[in-house]
Image (cartoon, rainbow, N blue to C red):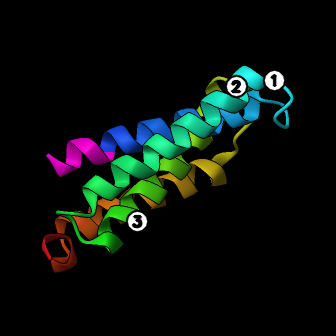
Amino acid sequence: MHWLLLAIGIAIEITATASLKLSEGFTRLHFAGLTLICFGLAFYVMSLVVRTMPVGVAYSVWAGGGIAGVTLLGAVVFGQSLDGYAYLGIGLILAGIVVLNALSSAASG
């Protein structure tokens, strides 16, 4: 259950970051409000996750997933160009998450 909550938290955090971009420096109030609501909700969901998952593992997956997700969202939605090194970096982040969860005993802790 905590993995599902973590995935939901990551999705909400990605939504919050996209809304932050769309708020244009908090000048578009509906996106500014959505940003604040989503970040608050993402932190609440994260607080539920760390009840049953080690905080270091939860945070590393949340941060890595958020970085990869926002970077890809920037490319797809906002037309930001990514080069090969950007994709390599995203791949390394995702590989790190897989290694942490598949091979490390810290993830079970």
Where residue 10 appears, x then y in whole percent?
Answer: 42, 44
**Quadrant location, the N terminus:** top left
Q: Nearer the viewer, mark 3 or mark 1?
A: 1
Name the one closer to the observer, 7 or 34.
34
Which three-letter amino acid code belongs to the residue tagged 3? Ser
Element at badge 3?
helix
Mark 3 vs mark 1, CA separation in Å: 31 Å
Indicate yes or no whether the magenta region holds residue 3. yes
Q: Earlier in the sequence, mark 3 or mark 1?
A: 1
Q: Identify the residue position indicated by label 2 in the image.
A: 31
Amino acid identity at mark 1: Arg
Do callouts 2 and 1 mark residues in contact (Cβ within 8 Å)?
yes
Residue 99 x %, y %: 28, 67
Q: What type of secondary structure mainly makes up the magenta span?
A: helix
In magenta, the rendered stretch is: 1-6
Residue 30 placement (x, y as % from top left): 71, 21
Disc marking residue 28: 1
Distance from the alpha carbon under mark 2 to that under mark 1: 6 Å
Query: In which quadrant of the rendered view does residue 32 lie?
Result: top right
User: If the image is split into quadrants, where does the C terminus sit?
Assistant: bottom left
- Residue 69 visible in the current orientation: no
Q: Which residue lies under the disc numbered 3? A: 60
- Crowding near pointer 2: few (<14 within 10 Å), some, many (20+)? many
